[in-house]
């Protein structure tokens, strides 16, 4: 899967994803990073899930299977763009925006 999707990915560097188990220090990391003037700590956002589900058929039995086998480059680019648009609406003047939703993995 990684080889097949090697050219996928967003070229935008605005999002900072903090991934960690609950009670593992992710909030502390967010607070430290967002103390910088260029960084906005947005907390746990639902946008990744919203963007993924927006274009996946509702009768899909497994989102992971769909993403691994049927996700196209065009679909991924649309999702990336929507995600960036959503986070930019939260903090339009920030260079970097933190999303620390544990489910983003």
Image (cartoon, rainbow, N blue to C red):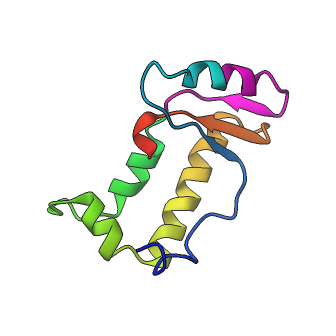
Q: Is residue 82 left or right of residue 57?
A: right
Left or right: 105, with 92 as reference point? left
What residue do we see at 43% from left, 38% from top? 46
Query: Magenta part of the protein: which range?
Result: 30-44
| 22 vs 82: above or below | above
Q: Residue at x 45, y 72 (%)?
A: 75
Number of numbered discs on residues: 0
Can you give x and y, in whole percent of width and height, for residue 1 in the image? 40, 74
In the rendering, at what x and y percent does residue 103 appear? 39, 39
Tell me the residue at 73%/25% (across/down). Answer: 34
> In which quadrant of the rendered view does residue 91 lie?
top right
Residue 81 vertical position relative to residue 1 in the rendered view, above or below: above
In depth, the one of 90 and 32 nearer the eye is 32
Residue lying at the far bottom of the rendered structure: 4
Q: Is residue 45 above or below residue 36?
A: below
Residue 29, percent across and down? Answer: 65, 25
Relative placement, left or right, of 103 versus 37 is: left
The quadrant holding residue 87 is: top right
- In magenta segment, residue 63: no
Asked if residue 42 lies in the magenta stretch, the reply is yes
Q: Residue at x 60, y 29 (%)?
A: 42
**Quadrant in the rendering for residue 25:** top right
Q: Between residues 23 and 43, which one lies in front from this camera angle?
A: 23
Residue at the outermost right position: 37
Q: Position of residue 30 (x, y in %)?
A: 65, 25
Say left or right for 80 vs 51: right
């Amino acid at each position: 899967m990684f080889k097949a999707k090697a050219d996928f990915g967003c070229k935008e560097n605005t999002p900072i994803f903090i991934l960690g188990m609950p009670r593992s220090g992710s909030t502390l990391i967010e607070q430290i990073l967002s103390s910088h003037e260029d960084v906005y700590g947005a907390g746990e956002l639902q946008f990744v899930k919203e963007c993924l589900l927006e274009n996946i058929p509702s009768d899909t039995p497994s989102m992971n299977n769909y993403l691994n086998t049927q996700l196209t480059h065009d679909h991924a680019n649309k999702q990336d763009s929507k995600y960036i648009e959503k986070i930019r609406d939260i903090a339009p003047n920030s260079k970097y925006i933190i999303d620390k939703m544990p489910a983003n993995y």
